[in-house]
């Protein structure tokens, strides 16, 4: 890029002074934001900072209370997603908007005006897939695709419907590292073709890997607008997001006490997966009290089945699982498995309490709310207010409720946490890791599944690597060799 | 031959059920259950018969039957889709509404003659031994079903309108994201589906029974709703299933014509017994094929 070229790049999209409140929560407060052609613009900030809200205002899902939008320099009014689409703005939602029972081509056709010609549509999808490097088969039903493929299908849909601004809300939070790399290749290609790309993420290394500019939101306001990420250190960006510095995790911790019975012990365990195929094979593993065992592996290598078997949620098909006591669980997919969207935060906490306080025959909700507040204060993950319905919480705030419920208990012999920091901002991720370390220090065994090798290495004592449903190896986390772990994950030649 | 008689009767008797079941398929693919199908058939049967009697034109009767069914279906759509009323309660209410309306206005037509549809053997095709007798010596309305089922299949799977219907039944929120109204799509699907049920009713009175009498649909509307489930929401399976039920209905007359004395009640119950057996056997498996929005309705 030359210096003389920069000022002539008019924004594809510009938002000025966008404000939107939900009740007394001001989710966006006078936000300025713009997207240039041929750039990847990262939008970062804490959970509840208003990132998704800003995107939804741009995409017409919500109307702003005040502020204006221009597209190609002309003032526009966006009353709904259809308006946004016709202005060339496409959005890939955190929870993808695809119909699982329809094929990829049919899903794309749904987004386009005009008659349905399935053959022509399939060819068009295949051609676009080729052009943009988004490998996905047009005639497969979306329900049969992996999450990464679904995301590619969604991006294709957005591109084929003529969008020049492509907005992605936390696209990487559901992807395995290899899939993230593939997604970033696609985004780079789009940037090269002059598209404007907006991406929300909580990971600084992703900002560094892909973003030309970064905007930081905090409490609904812009604290850093369209800055060059290279001009700021990690610590500066984190401080902009959180409002204070976040110290690193303590490097040294006590070794687990020896000579006690395992918190959970698996001997030759096998289990069937959702489709009836054997997804867990001959796993032998002990988690000792006070020990954190990290589980690494390519997505779908049996991590889910392992967690469910340990928690007693899935029948054991072979072998023996022996647990020393109660288990607290952070589920892999809270929205699908553990959340009742219509219930409030307090009601979710009540579901996890060992005994619910009663007054005569009724649940004593006043006391439950008090307990929830105490729990929140003790755990320190800053849950949303107790009366809020989980359905209206931001993604990261749902995760906080799950974590507070599971990590707030001190009566469990074992904690099973699947992707504990998924969707969490930097400070909350740190706090969560501290909580896991604290549970271990208090004598509980901890099993953590994560896609993030850095996270696993920094908090685990040992790392169990899974491949194709089997335990490919267990390595010491202290001084662990990434290459070695990667080799175990993929099963390549030594 | 007994088997040929039963199969011929199956095609003839299955027609009314097929119209209704295809209509219900359309509604359910859009995510709405219409338990009032029985009521829609009844108003269609009376409307069709009455208009045929008054105008002397059975084709106008068919049209009237479809319109009467559609009118009742529109009531269901407004209540369920726009007012968010409970689908099952509204559907049952609709059934009784149809029953009440038709016994009120139908009394004058009981025993009254009206022009109807008579069998018209198709040239050549009708002369094929056995198959010709079973399939091609029927009234024109029955021939109509030969094209309606494939047509519905084509509409659902190969047209934009059908795509919108399927999307409404699977993920209404996705439809909304693309600027379509799931409410409108559902209203159209339920109304058109009820029109088909009305057509089925009109076939019953003007081509099958050549008469109107109170409650003449005799539970066919409910069989149609059940049939949709065990045909896994697929028009062509609905077609096959309708003939099966038609054949079950044809067993009694075929045996009686041969002088067999059989327990009438047992024979009348046969189609319902078949329905129950199918639902019990296929229950879980078919529910997995159900449109997602519908599963939400069932699994509350
Ligand atoms: N539909 C809604 N009704 C009520 N409040 C809402 C609604 N949508 C968002 N909010 C509130 O607005 C604030 C901003 O939410 P938003 O979803 O924009 O956050 P976010 O930055 O995307 O967070 P995350 O990183 O957790 O996804 C939060 O306090 C949230 O609870
Ligand atoms: Mg968000």
Image (tube, rainbow, N blue to C red):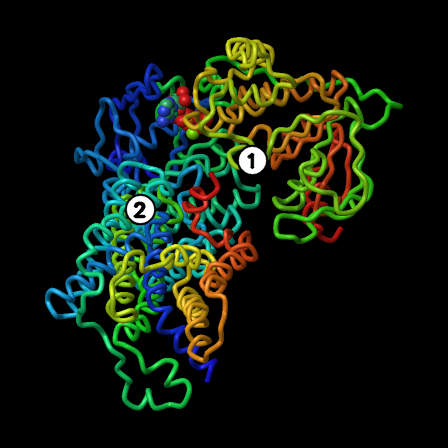
Q: Position of residue A283 (x, y in %)?
A: 78, 43
Residues marked 1 and 2, same chain: no
Q: Position of residue A285 (x, y in %)?
A: 79, 37
Q: What residue did someone put label 1 on?
A: A337
Cβ of disc 1 within 8 Å of ligand 1? no
Q: What residue did someone put label 2 on?
A: B96
Residue appearing at x 21%, y 56% in the figure: B106
Q: Is residue A217 visible?
A: no
- Between A492 and A330, which is closer to the camera in this rendering? A330
Quadrant where the image shows the N terminus of chain A: top left
- Between B234 and A390, which is closer to the camera in this rendering? B234
Q: Chain of mark 1?
A: A
CA distance for labels 1 and 2: 40 Å
Compared with A35, A21 (above or below) is: above
> Which quadrant of the view contains residue A364?
top right
Ligand 1 quadrant in view: top left
Compared with B8, A439 (above or below) is: above
Q: Is residue A233 visible?
A: yes
Secondary structure, mark 2, is helix
Q: Residue furthest right?
A: A259
Secondary structure, mark 1, is helix
Q: Is residue A336 left or right of residue A284?
A: left
Q: Is residue A337 left or right of residue A393?
A: right
Q: Position of residue B163 (x, y in %)?
A: 33, 56
Q: Chain of mark 2?
A: B
């Amino acid at each position: 890029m030359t210096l003389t070229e920069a000022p002539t790049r008019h924004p594809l999209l510009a938002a000025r002074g966008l404000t939107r409140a939900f009740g007394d929560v001001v989710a966006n407060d006078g936000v300025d934001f713009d997207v240039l052609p041929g750039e990847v613009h990262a939008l970062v900030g804490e959970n509840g900072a208003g990132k998704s809200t800003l995107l939804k205002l741009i995409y017409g899902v919500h109307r702003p209370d005040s502020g204006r939008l221009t597209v190609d320099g002309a003032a526009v009014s966006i009353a709904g997603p259809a308006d946004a689409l016709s202005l060339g703005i496409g959005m890939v939602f955190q929870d993808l908007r695809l119909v699982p029972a329809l094929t990829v081509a049919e899903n794309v056709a749904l987004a386009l005006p005009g008659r349905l010609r399935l053959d022509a549509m399939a060819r068009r999808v295949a051609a676009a897939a080729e052009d943009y490097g988004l490998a996905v088969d047009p005639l497969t039903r979306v329900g049969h695709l992996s999450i990464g493929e679904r995301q590619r299908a969604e991006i294709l849909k957005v591109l084929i419907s003529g969008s020049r601004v492509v907005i992605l809300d936390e696209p990487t939070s559901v992807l395995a590292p290899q899939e993230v790399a593939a997604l970033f290749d696609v985004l780079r290609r789009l940037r090269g073709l002059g598209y404007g790309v907006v991406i929300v993420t909580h990971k600084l290394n992703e900002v560094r890997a892909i973003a030309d500019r970064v905007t930081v939101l905090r409490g609904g306001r812009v604290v850093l607008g369209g800055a060059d990420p290279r001009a700021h250190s990690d610590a500066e960006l984190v401080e902009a997001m959180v409002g204070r510095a976040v110290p690193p995790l303590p490097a040294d911790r006590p070794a687990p006490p020896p000579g006690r019975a395992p918190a959970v012990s698996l001997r030759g365990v096998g289990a069937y997966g959702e489709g009836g195929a054997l997804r867990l094979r001959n796993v032998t593993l002990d988690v000792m009290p006070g020990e954190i065992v990290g589980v690494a592996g390519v997505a779908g290598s049996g991590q889910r089945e392992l967690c469910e078997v340990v928690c007693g949620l899935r029948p054991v098909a072979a072998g023996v699982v022996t647990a020393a006591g109660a288990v607290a669980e952070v589920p892999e997919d809270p929205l699908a498995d553990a959340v009742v969207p219509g219930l409030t935060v307090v009601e979710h906490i009540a579901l996890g309490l060992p005994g619910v306080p009663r007054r005569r025959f009724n649940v004593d909700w006043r006391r439950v709310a008090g307990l929830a507040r105490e729990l929140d204060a003790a755990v320190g993950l800053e849950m949303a207010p107790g009366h809020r319905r989980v359905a209206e919480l931001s993604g990261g705030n749902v995760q906080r409720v799950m974590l507070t419920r599971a990590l707030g208990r001190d009566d469990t012999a074992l904690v099973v946490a699947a992707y504990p920091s998924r969707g969490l901002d930097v400070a909350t991720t740190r706090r969560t890791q501290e909580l896991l370390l604290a549970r271990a220090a208090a004598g509980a065994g901890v099993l953590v599944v994560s896609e993030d090798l850095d996270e696993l290495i920094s908090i685990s004592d040992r790392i169990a690597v899974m491949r194709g449903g089997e335990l490919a190896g267990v390595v010491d986390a202290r001084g662990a060799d990434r290459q070695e772990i990667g080799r175990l994950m993929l099963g390549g030649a030594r | 031959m007994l088997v040929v008689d039963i199969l011929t009767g199956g095609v003839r008797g299955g027609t009314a059920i097929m119209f209704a079941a295809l209509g219900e398929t359309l509604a359910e693919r859009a995510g709405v259950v219409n338990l009032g199908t029985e009521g829609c058939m009844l108003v269609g049967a009376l409307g069709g018969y009455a208009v045929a009697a008054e105008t002397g034109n059975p084709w106008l009767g068919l049209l009237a039957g479809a319109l009467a069914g559609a009118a009742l279906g529109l009531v269901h759509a407004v209540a369920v889709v726009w007012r968010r009323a409970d689908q099952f309660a509204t559907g049952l209410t609709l059934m009784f509404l149809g029953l009440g309306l038709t016994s009120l206005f139908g009394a004058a037509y009981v025993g009254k003659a009206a022009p109807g549809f008579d069998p018209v053997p198709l040239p050549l095709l009708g002369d094929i031994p056995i198959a010709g007798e079973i399939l091609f010596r029927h009234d024109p309305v029955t021939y109509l079903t030969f094209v309606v089922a494939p047509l519905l299949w084509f509409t659902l799977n190969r047209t934009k309108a059908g795509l919108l219907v399927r999307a409404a039944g699977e993920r209404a929120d996705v439809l909304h994201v693309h600027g379509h109204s799931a409410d409108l799509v559902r209203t159209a699907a339920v109304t058109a589906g009820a029109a088909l049920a009305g057509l089925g009713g009109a076939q019953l009175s003007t081509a099958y029974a050549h008469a109107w009498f109170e409650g003449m649909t005799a539970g066919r509307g409910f069989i149609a709703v059940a049939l949709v489930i065990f045909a896994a929401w697929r028009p062509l399976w609905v077609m096959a299933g309708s003939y099966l039920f038609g054949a079950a209905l044809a067993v009694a007359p075929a045996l009686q014509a041969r002088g067999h004395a059989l327990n009438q009640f047992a024979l009348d119950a046969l189609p319902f017994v078949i329905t129950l057996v199918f639902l019990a056997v296929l229950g879980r498996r078919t529910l997995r094929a159900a449109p997602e929005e519908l599963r939400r309705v069932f699994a509350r």
